[in-house]
Amino acid sequence: MSAPVEIILVSRAPAPDLGFSPYGPLILHPVADLAQLGEALVRQRPDGLVFDCPDAPTLARVAAWPGLAQAALDAAVVVLGPEPALADVLRLLRLGVQDVLPRREAWGLAMDRPLRLAVERKRLEREARKAYASDLATGLPNHAQLMEHMTHLLALREREPAPMAVLLLQLQGLDEATRDLGPEAANVLRRKVAVRLRSGLRASDVVASIGGDAFAVLLAWMDDPKDAGRVAEKLAQLLLRPFAVAGRDLGVSVATGLAQYPQQGKDARELLQRARESCLTAVPRGRLPFGARGTAAPAANDE
């Protein structure tokens, strides 16, 4: 039996039972309105969302809901409504909705097939986007994916203000690894750098590879703007420990840059550029002699 597909249904009508559907099982979690949906999305990440729109005003409220584009990033969204005009359908599709279906045909037990297909299309889309937007050497998001994350998060911050920051870490030592040990050793070193950065952050933060020797960190929210500087220092210290590669302990130096939202910019490109400028003026720290055995042990989670 396949794993249950978790669906949040926004409707004032009784939810149909799709638990025994041949396209399921599909588990529906009903909520009455958009306010309850927002609360539900804080608690869980469903596979899909269904908006039941029995009339044109309800459909218009869904299309105007500020959280729709963000919700459609993470889940397959299906809208059931009165026969909508083409302009309404195209607007919803541009916001990330997977499908817009006539309610009279798809409501009830008949929604199981289009729901399951929408979820599967979303999964395929996510896998394709991940492959396209990942740095192959590290598995981290690349520059394009970082900009997409930042753009969506900044749109959210316009509605829900909170401090956030972008960190840039510029490394030195990768060129020497390539020259002395070969390109694969340098890739191993970059992967271990990625592991350490990821280990020093929360699940909500984003680490991206934005060049052969540069990494960016998006701190999605902070309790105090001063936390950004503390995180930058923590990450730098993690990277100053030697890395075991090809039987040798390799050291890197690191320079860090920081840009804070909203003080230093409200646009993704502007914030990243500010972080880059800050990094260029920073003095790199660290660097063990290349190939020398350091006194500090490599981090336990490097391998």
Image (cartoon, helix red, strand yellow):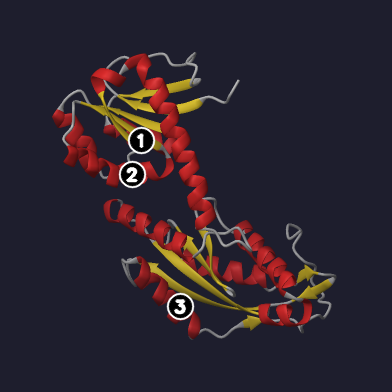
C-alpha distance separating marks 3 and 2: 32 Å
C-alpha distance separating marks 2 and 1: 8 Å
Q: Quadrant of the C terminus?
A: bottom right
**Circle 2: is it few (<14), some (14-19), or many (20+) Cα within 10 Å?**
many
Position of 14 with respect to 219 (left or right) is: left
Q: Amino acid at mark 3?
A: Arg
Residue 8 pos. (x, y %): 39, 28
**SS at badge 3:** helix
Instruction: Identify the residue at image location x=30%, y=18%.
Output: 107
Which disc, if any, is residue 145? Answer: none
Q: Residue furthest front?
A: 86
Q: Amino acid at mark 2?
A: Gly
Residue 39 pos. (x, y %): 36, 35
Q: Are marks 2 and 1 in contact (CB under 8 Å)?
A: yes
Q: Are marks 3 and 1 in contact (CB under 8 Å)?
A: no
Residue 13 pos. (x, y %): 27, 16
Which disc, if any, is residue 276? Answer: 3
Residue 12 vertical placement versus 246 (above, below): above
Residue 106 vertical placement versus 161 (above, below): above
The reply to whether residue 280 is visible in this rendering is yes
The reply to whether residue 47 is visible in this rendering is no
**Circle 3: is it few (<14), some (14-19), or many (20+) Cα within 10 Å?**
many
Give whichever of 69, 37 is nearer the camera: 69
Q: Which residue is mark 1?
A: 77
Q: Which residue is mark 2?
A: 96
**Sequence-first tag of 3 and 2:** 2
Give whichever of 124, 194 is nearer the camera: 124
Give whichever of 61, 43 is nearer the camera: 61
Q: Quadrant of residue 52?
A: top left
